[in-house]
């Protein structure tokens, strides 16, 4: 057959370009390292910067001279970047990680050497724990997004689902005196928004982004109204939820750094871990996942093979609503003690950013959410050592990272091809 | 109504060609058979038993498979994943874990049995179109269909790939499968079909044996006798009008799509560019029109450099342009015919000024041009252009472009998705324009069209013009060129290609 000739002729090797993405990133990282060494090194004082793996700043810590630390770790970051030029593809992830962590330590050396006495210690255990805790709603929200958007329904209403979940959790936990009832109610709260999203987007073909924004406003208005009508009038009857219990895993929770972060958790932490694994395995190793991804990429192809496109979308959007509602319960059952108007304050949109930064994958979204959580935790820590840098700058970091990621500088970010497009038969 | 009282019988082990113009209702009929559309009347019998086909699942269960004109493949999936979708091999149990090993094995088996040479582990988007089509065939065969519907399967293939496909169809026939082969290409029908059913305007107009002459089939298809050959005199080529040298252009993804192209189009000649779609033709034309940045090289129009000119300035300099995708780049679908006819000159006298447009002047000129170019719409041109058939939409574009005095006319796929009658008309217009001394640059993925119109044929492959030949060159030779096989040593090229 002549086909082989055609293929052979068409598979001409592309000329190998020197400036691969890895090498470009390497140059960027080297530049960051040099800047860190020079800038942080010159700004830092020669007082000690101390690091401890514990959750508090009392107790033993590793110390280093501020200037020396800032310069050494800055140079280390620059070296990691330079190494990428040589190794190209190999060890890219490791070198990148090493470089970023080094640049960060360089920065911290500067900050800590400026801190008042007794405060020049960073308790890494506590930073790790709050990073994970702050990431929890983002992980759950992003997972809801993965479920919807992998089957091509854009979910901008995560914020609204959070609010409904938070409200329902506060109210029903107080009424029933049980957080488990509250969590079930939170799922139902998210489900209400998801149902509206599904019917209007899939059945009535409403523009999904506009629809998501409208549903957020609706959720804000509804919870605000009910808050005024019920909760504000009688807080003790409607709005005094208890915290979810903490479940330590014996032994493991004693491990420094990751013990407090991962093994002194609660239903939200363990739930998020289980859901990430479940959705990852489901999406890439089961029939449901194959069909979901097919519907998200090319619904007509799935339809012509007898896959029920619309039913699958309904199911995924509704399950996504349950997950986001559960995430909403975090706000009233873990992070604060009661419901307040608009208490989610845009974190639903941050979850959306984590979804995109994580390239629509459950594990990627989780890592993105952890990164966002880490930035917030770090901003918080720096606040407690009286850093001269406004915490808003660190809080900006996740969004700058997302913009860079979406602009395609860090690899190609590709949404499911049919994302946001309603499917009309024929 | 797309189908009106159609009857079609396909025997076991038969290749049945369904011949008809674009819009005659061939695809509609097949979508009914495949359950994507529901018939208002009539019934479907499989093995003489009536069946209800409410969806693709029913069709597959009844033993009917379909290869769609636009492939129904998920580009980011592997071949095996595409094949298993909808009928997944799983390890059993309620969760349904995918058994990829079994799926791969099945693909390999079917691929080997029918000599399709499909690798289950390749990602579909990396495969050439011809192979993607074979993946579609594998998809149908793994579902054990007895009747395979191929909807315009050769539209996207090179002549060689078409030959391969015909060979595969013979293999399938020998294995007892029936095939419905939908096409409007007469040569292929005559090469492979056992029986031919011709459809016109949603009705069957006749069944013919394969030895019917092409002229006869064409007139059955169109309903009147048509001229298959364009009557054109010898070209009286004059001075060079468009001169392109060392052109390099990137595609949307930043890859080099045109890689050092030199071309000259002279006054009064048609230069045809032949080539399989996606070999840089689109980017070349768009770069000449100022719609896409030029990375390297120069283009001159009548000796004046075109570099830095806006598209409007290029048009005003006497260039006419029929873009490849009329619905996206050629027309504003929600505007009326009259408005679309003056898209290029709405702000010049007499149609308007910088500040106002004059609807009466626009309507008046629309009336004249609708008549002159035989656009089938209401005479005043107030219908929305999107409501016209493909052929008439294309005539609107051609009418617009030919209303200015032209030095150079660039036409990309001028007759894609256009009925035979309109093709004939558009071809005559192009030849007429050439007779007026206009230089014509024609890009078409239909080799027949290039050969019919061109005075010289440039073959593009992978961003380069690999040969410029006379249109009298044997089709096979041009076909090989389109596949990138240069004819320095045609003997080895052909032997090499038969080794598979």
Image (spheres, coloured by chain):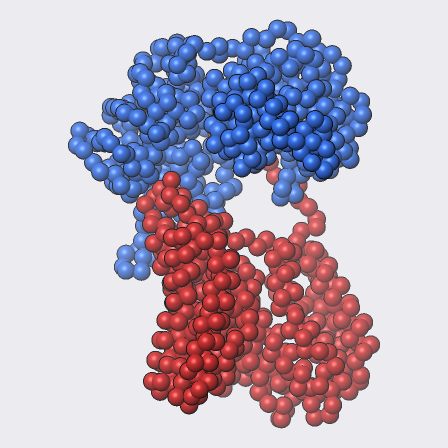
* Rendered position, A320 above or below A6: below
Q: Give whichever of B200, B148 is nearer the camera.
A: B200
Q: Would residue B1 be seen by someone viewing this image from the given angle?
A: yes
Asked whether residue B17 appears in the rendered view, the answer is no
Q: In which quarter of the image is residue B73?
A: top left
* Residue closer to the observer: A258 or A94: A258
Q: In this view, does A109 lie to the left or right of B222?
A: right
The residue under the point 60% across, 84% down is: A53
Q: Chain B is drawn in which colour?
A: blue
Residue ranking furthest to the left? B49
Q: Nearer the viewer, residue B187 or A263?
A: B187
Indicate the quadrant containing the C terminus of chain B: top left, top right, bottom left or bottom right: top left
Residue at image x 65%, y 10%? B435
Q: How far across and down, in percent of the image, does residue B159 sit?
A: 49, 23
Percent from the top left, x then y, of residue B254? 65, 43
Q: Is residue B294 above or below residue B93?
A: above
Query: Which residue is drawn at the image coordinates 58% and 70% (left, top)?
Result: A371
At which x and y percent is residue B365? 62, 23
Q: Which of A410 and B111 is in front in this view?
A: A410
Q: Locate the N terminus of chain B and report the quarter of the image it occupies.
A: top left
Q: In which quarter of the image is residue B12?
A: top left
Residue A95 is drawn in which quadrant?
bottom right
Rendered red, the chain in question is: A
> Residue A168, how many percent across, how many down?
40, 77
Residue at image coords 43%, 51%: A205
């Amino acid at each position: 057959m002549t086909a082989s000739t055609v293929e052979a002729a068409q598979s001409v090797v592309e000329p190998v370009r020197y400036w691969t993405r890895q090498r470009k990133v390497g140059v960027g990282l080297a530049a960051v390292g040099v800047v860190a060494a020079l800038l942080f090194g010159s700004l830092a004082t020669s007082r000690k910067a101390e690091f401890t793996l514990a959750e508090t700043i009392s107790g033993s810590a590793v110390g280093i001279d501020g200037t020396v630390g800032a310069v050494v770790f800055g140079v280390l970051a620059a070296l990691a970047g330079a190494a990428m030029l040589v190794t190209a593809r190999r060890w890219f992830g490791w070198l990148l990680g090493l470089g970023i962590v080094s640049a960060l330590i360089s920065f911290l050396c500067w900050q800590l050497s400026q801190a008042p006495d007794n405060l020049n210690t960073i308790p890494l255990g506590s930073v790790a724990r709050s990073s994970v805790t702050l990431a929890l709603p983002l992980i759950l929200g992003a997972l809801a997004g993965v479920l919807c958007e992998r089957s091509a329904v854009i979910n901008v209403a995560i914020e609204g689902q959070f609010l409904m979940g938070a409200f329902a959790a506060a109210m029903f936990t107080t009424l029933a005196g049980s957080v488990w009832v509250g969590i079930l109610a939170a799922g139902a709260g998210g489900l209400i928004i998801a149902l509206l999203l599904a019917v209007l987007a899939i059945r009535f073909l409403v523009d999904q982004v506009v629809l998501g924004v409208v549903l957020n406003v609706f959720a804000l208005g509804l919870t605000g109204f009910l808050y005024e009508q019920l909760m504000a009038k009688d807080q003790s009857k409607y709005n005094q939820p208890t915290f979810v219990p903490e479940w330590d895993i014996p032994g493991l929770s004693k491990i420094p750094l990751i013990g407090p972060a991962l093994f002194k958790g609660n239903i939200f932490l363990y739930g998020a871990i289980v859901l990430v694994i479940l959705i990852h395995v489901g999406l890439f190793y089961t029939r449901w996942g194959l069909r979901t991804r097919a519907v998200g990429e090319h619904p007509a192809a799935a339809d012509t093979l007898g896959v029920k496109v619309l039913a699958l979308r309904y199911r995924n959007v509704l399950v996504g609503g349950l997950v986001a509602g559960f995430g909403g319960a975090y706000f009233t059952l873990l992070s604060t003690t009661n419901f307040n108007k608009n208490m989610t304050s845009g974190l639903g949109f941050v979850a959306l950013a984590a979804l995109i930064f994580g390239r629509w994958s459950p594990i990627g979204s989780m890592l993105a959410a952890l990164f966002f959580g880490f930035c917030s935790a770090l901003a918080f820590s720096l606040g407690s050592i009286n850093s001269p840098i406004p915490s808003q700058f660190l809080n900006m970091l996740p969004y700058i990272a997302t913009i860079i990621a979406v602009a395609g500088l860090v690899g190609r970010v590709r949404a499911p091809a049919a994302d946001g497009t309603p499917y009309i038969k024929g | 109504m797309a189908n009106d009282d159609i009857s079609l019988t396909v025997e076991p082990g038969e290749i049945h060609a369904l011949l008809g113009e674009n819009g005659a209702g061939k695809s509609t009929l097949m979508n009914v058979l495949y359950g994507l559309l529901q018939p208002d009347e009539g019934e479907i019998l499989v093995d003489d038993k009536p069946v209800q086909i409410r969806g693709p699942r029913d069709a597959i269960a009844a033993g009917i498979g379909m290869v769609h004109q636009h492939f129904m493949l998920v580009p980011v999936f592997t071949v095996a994943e595409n094949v298993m979708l909808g009928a997944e091999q799983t390890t059993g149990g309620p969760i349904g874990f995918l058994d990829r090993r079994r799926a791969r094995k099945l693909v390999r088996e079917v691929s080997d049995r029918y000599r399709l040479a499909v690798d289950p582990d390749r990602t579909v988007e990396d495969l050439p179109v011809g192979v993607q089509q074979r993946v579609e065939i594998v998809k149908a065969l793994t579902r054990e269909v007895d009747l395979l519907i191929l909807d315009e399967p050769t539209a996207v293939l090179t002549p060689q790939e078409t030959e391969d496909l015909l060979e595969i169809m013979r293999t399938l026939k020998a294995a007892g499968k029936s095939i419905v082969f939908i096409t409007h290409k007469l040569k292929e029908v005559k090469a492979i079909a056992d029986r031919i059913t011709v459809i016109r305007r949603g009705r069957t107009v006749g069944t013919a044996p394969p030895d019917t002459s092409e002229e006869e089939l064409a007139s059955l298809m169109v309903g009147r006798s048509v001229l298959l050959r364009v009557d054109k005199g010898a070209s009286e080529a004059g001075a060079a009008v468009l001169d392109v040298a060392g052109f390099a252009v990137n595609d949307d993804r930043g890859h080099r799509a045109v890689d050092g192209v030199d071309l000259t189009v002279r006054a009064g000649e048609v230069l045809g560019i032949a080539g399989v779609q996606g070999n840089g033709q689109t980017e070349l034309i768009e770069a000449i029109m100022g719609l896409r940045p030029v990375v390297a090289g120069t283009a001159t129009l009548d000796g004046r450099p075109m570099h830095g000119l806006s598209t409007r300035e290029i048009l005003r300099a006497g260039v006419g342009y029929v873009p490849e995708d009329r619905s996206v780049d050629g027309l504003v679908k929600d505007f009326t015919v009259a408005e679309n006819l003056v898209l290029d000159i709405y702000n010049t006298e007499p149609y308007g000024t910088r500040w106002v447009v004059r609807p009466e002047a626009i309507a008046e000129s629309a009336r004249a041009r609708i008549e002159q170019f035989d656009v089938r719409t209401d005479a005043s041109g107030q219908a929305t252009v999107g409501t016209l058939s493909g052929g008439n939409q294309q005539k609107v574009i051609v009418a617009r472009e030919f209303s200015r005095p032209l030095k150079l006319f660039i036409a990309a796929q001028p007759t894609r998705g256009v009925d035979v009658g309109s093709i004939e008309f558009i071809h005559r217009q192009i030849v007429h324009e050439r007779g007026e001394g206009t230089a014509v640059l024609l890009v078409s993925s239909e080799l027949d069209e290039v050969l019919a119109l061109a005075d010289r044929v440039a073959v593009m492959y992978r961003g380069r013009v690999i040969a410029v030949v006379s249109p009298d060159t044997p089709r096979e030779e041009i076909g090989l060129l389109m596949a990138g096989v240069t004819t320095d040593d045609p003997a080895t090229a052909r032997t090499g290609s038969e080794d598979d």
